[in-house]
Amino acid sequence: MSANRWFATGNYFTTYREEQRIFSTHLDRLVFCLFLTAFFVWPFFIDLSTKYMLVLDNILIAVIAVYGLNLVLGFGGLISVGHAAFVGVGAYTVASLAGVIGEQHMLITHGWPLMIIGAGLMGAIFGLIVGLPALRLRHLYLLMATLSFQMIFEWTIGFLNFFNQGQFIYVGRVHWLTGEVGRNEHYLFWYYVLLVTVVICGFGVRNLLRTRYGRSLVAVRDNDRAADAMGMHPGLAKVFAFGLAGFFAGIAGAMQAYLDRGAGFETFTLHESIQYLAMTIVGGMGQLTGCFFGPAAIEILDLQMEHLAEWAGHILPSALDLATGLRPLSFGLVIVLFLMFEPRGIANWWRILRTYLKLWPFRY
Amino acid sequence: MTYFFQLVVSGIVVGSIYALAAIGFVLIYKSSRVLNIAHGQIIAAGAYITYALTVWCQIPIYISFVLSMIVTFFLAMSVERIFLRRLIGEPIISVIMVTIGLMSIIDGLIYLTPFGSENFSFPAFLPTEPVVFAGIYISYTQIVGVIITFLLIGIFSWFFKKSTVGISMRAVSDDQMASMSIGISVPRVFGLAWACAGLTAAAAGGIIGNITGLNFETLHAFGIIVFPVVILGGLDSLPGAVAAGIIMGLIQQFASGYLDGNFGLNGTANLLPYIILLVILLFKPHGLFGTHEIERV
Amino acid sequence: MKSLKFTTCIMVAAAVLMMALPVSAVAGNVYKLGLSLAITGPTSDAGNPYAKGVEDYFRYVNDMKLLGDDTIECTIRDDKYETSITKRNFEEYLDMGIVFYLNYSTGSTLALKRDFDEVKMPTMPASFHAGNIEGSDYIFLPIASYSAQAIGLAEYLVRKHEGKTPKVAMFIHPSAFGRGPVEDIEKSIKAGLDIEIVEVVEHGQDLDNTAMLQRWKSKNVQYVISQTVQSPVAGMLKDASRLGLVAGKFGEKDKITFLGAHYTGGNDLIALAGDAAENFYWTTSYIVTSEPGAGADAQLALAKRYGRDDKAANSHNYANGVMVAQVAAEAIRRAKARGNEINKETLYQEMLEMNGMNAFYPVTTVGPVTYSKDDHQGVDTLQLYAVQDGEFRAVGKPFIPEYTEKIKK
């Protein structure tokens, strides 16, 4: 059975090379391709309302940001409560440049892929700087460092005229082969751009974890002294993780700026940072698949609670207060319950499901 | 010169309230190594309980202040029992994130009450005219606040130094395994630490509520400003928390007194604590009084 | 067997009929509106009564059949003061086919400005930030902007002040919302308004404002114009009254008179500051329930009708919500009276024509609502209130600030 790469029911790896494959079986690859095709093709058949299109886009942006946070949190074992600020760095890279050279400048409207990568690099630089204390400190103290970065970011954006003092800075509509992307295609266009970015970044993360840098990161998380003894530099590994997290956050931020057609500081507050943390936890720390499930789960929970609150508002007239407490309450409960009962997140359910299907109809 | 001394006095007053808020934070960290991100929410809850008892139940404020400390004591204890007891032995990182979840849960619960979106203020129970000393003004509320702070700090220092429970709490913070082996119930110590933290948070909430009025946004923001304070003082040091609280209060007052409005700067009092936080992290991460045993990576 | 099938058919038919009946009973059209605001999160103390005001007035319109058989269906969503959720709500409202949109915060109004223009959606925000209407055709501020309010306050103090040029400090929120009026005040000074701005202070979460107040006193500041939310103002007033700095009457020498724009005042301020709020001067275009009048009676009756508690009923933000709902309902009523189809274009036209003899006079404001092509600020009239014995009382007659026009050139 072991040689059969279609219906392997368990681990039959005989070499490290086999273990390092991106897809351990052909079936996995097939399923992945089917999913991918489905994601690319469905807009041709289903006409989704603008609201859900926007929700979908926001989920995908969060997926990219959570890639970064998961590298720090799940693979590096470091808490960051300033992730929204990194996303903000990316968004403000695009927005403030648009403010300087004009929002309709060719670079902004036509050179947007360049802008997105540039924003990612900017995010990476800030990530490296904020990660510097990691050379000396362990996770608790890094939480503080990221917190102060978040606060300093908010003050800087709110204070400096260069950033329009936190007021919205507009970014023009982008151009594509067919000309300017108008309001009607806006969300669909960005859906595809985001989808492609998510796939590319996803492969990037998956491959990173196969390289020595990725594995040294995991080693440092599991036991930094042992990693040190093995000749890795734990501090550098962590700084590196922060840099990468900043990169993904920067990309997510730039796309957020393009999607929202500008940046205002309300989108990058401490509250958002906590939201990203929740997404990572619920999705599954240290799991690549968790990066997809987490954002989707949190967004859907939020929408469902909105509906529930609205329904409760109809049932209990003039008790609006009762309905409004539901959203933060459920949000908090979901985080806590996951940590208490399923610390490996939704990704673990996915893993269980996969194992079950692979063995079906046998139990083991 | 009066201006300078006024700043000093205000700084000490504000700082001792920070210290009071920080103590609860340090208590939890000291025994269980957990950073309690939801501390601001507990402060707010304490303030609201005091208000509810005073105004809705018509209990004299001195009694309701103590009562609310007791209520919050048990509230925090049950929070620990329900949410955190299970996580003993889990990585610290997930315990910290549970407190992040707790933050949202308490938010939600407070939004279910009128306190979430309405403003209240305590009935004045102290003389409103200030004490004037050599041109320096200080209000009775502030004096009482400072007295309560130092009273509580005194009680806790005694508690940790002399009482059996306090000593067992210190033992747990030192080495959980060793203290278990000599018969200390570690979970009970954790529960007690949370309970004490709740108690001080309620006290802080009551005082802040008296000074600023009860606005949810304003109240739970104190959970965040506590971070720079405890880092400056050293995460596990009670005297450190007090000293750092006062230093932070002074820095903020001087910043808003001398920097704001000059050099085109504004709102620096909000920013400086975090810059100090970063600097401390880079150069002296164990703070002024913290234990030096930070594990270098 | 056959009878069973028959019964099933009957039952299904009955079910269908029952489902259809309530729908067919309402013969008129349903006009959809949307409101997105912060019921939780920052500024929810203002958003909560605002939402209640909007909800109650539209229910009133439907219950009293003010639009005949037609009804208004206004969806109210909480956006937690987050722009991304506001955007999501707005897109959903567009999908629902709303004809008029009510927005809330300064940040989200600025962020969605382009969207409002692109889809040509008449919009009324709860933020009176002057920057909202810059370069936008479709945003209508309910009342005079914060800038106009601050200028109004400044003009009033110039009129009342005795002696040399009055020295004024500004106490503002550290955001666009707070900074907006500063620039316009400075422009007014250039245009001849006789005040001197000594300091502009952006507040933080201060537990003690003694230093700031002492500094102002040493610089002979006599008036403070604040543009922020209630909580920091309350803190400042408490400290000032502790220091004995609050003027007993307007412009008292060697004391400080505190003044503030719409969101600094109202019953929330009194709730927060207690006795220290005494002699705080506040301007808005809304009526307050502590000042008897037709508007106050109407507001209280509406709140009572729908079972609101005293706090909501007496809130000026409840009046605020009722007023925007009134304007929206009025636009629909007028368009209907003309026999036009109700859609966003006709409502936009109605809004633009709400001037001159067509001006709308809701009882909840101190002046008429006027809009035109160039005027997107609804009620231009302001009323000054001052706290006396724990209640806001009107001071003088409603007025219109002069320098708002002068600085336009």
Image (cartoon, coloured by chain):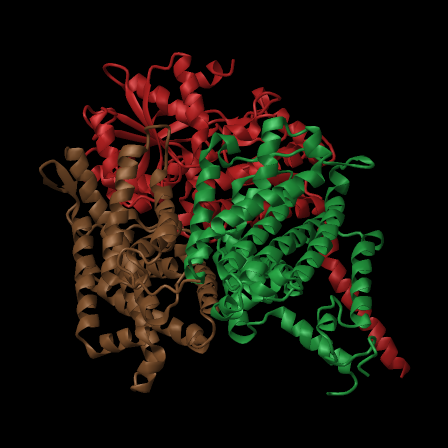
Instruction: Give coordinates of residue B269: x percent, y percent.
Output: 33, 41
Quadrant, the C terminus of chain B: bottom left
Figure chain in red? C
Q: Residue at (33%, 65%) from the top-left corner?
A: B293
**Can residue C1 be seen from the camera position used here?**
yes
Q: Quadrant of residue B158?
A: bottom left
Figure chain in brown? B
Q: Would you say A336 lies left or right of B35 here? A: right
Q: Nearer the viewer, residue C38 or C342?
A: C38
Q: Residue at (48%, 30%) from the top-left corner?
A: A161
Figure chain in green? A
Q: Residue at (39%, 65%) from the top-left corner?
A: B295
Q: Nearer the viewer, residue A200 or B224?
A: A200
Q: Quadrant of residue C22?
A: bottom right
Q: Is residue B289 above or below residue A263?
A: below
Quadrant, the N terminus of chain B: top left
Q: Nearer the viewer, residue C240 or C385?
A: C240
Q: Would you say B154 lies left or right of A50 here? A: left
Q: Is residue B39 above or below residue C404?
A: below
Q: Nearer the viewer, residue B79 or A144?
A: A144
Q: Would you say A307 lies left or right of A316 here? A: right
**Can residue C369 be seen from the camera position used here?**
no
Instruction: Give coordinates of residue B148: x percent, y percent.
Output: 19, 58
Q: Residue at (14%, 38%) from the top-left corner?
A: B136
Q: Is residue C379 above or below residue B118?
A: above
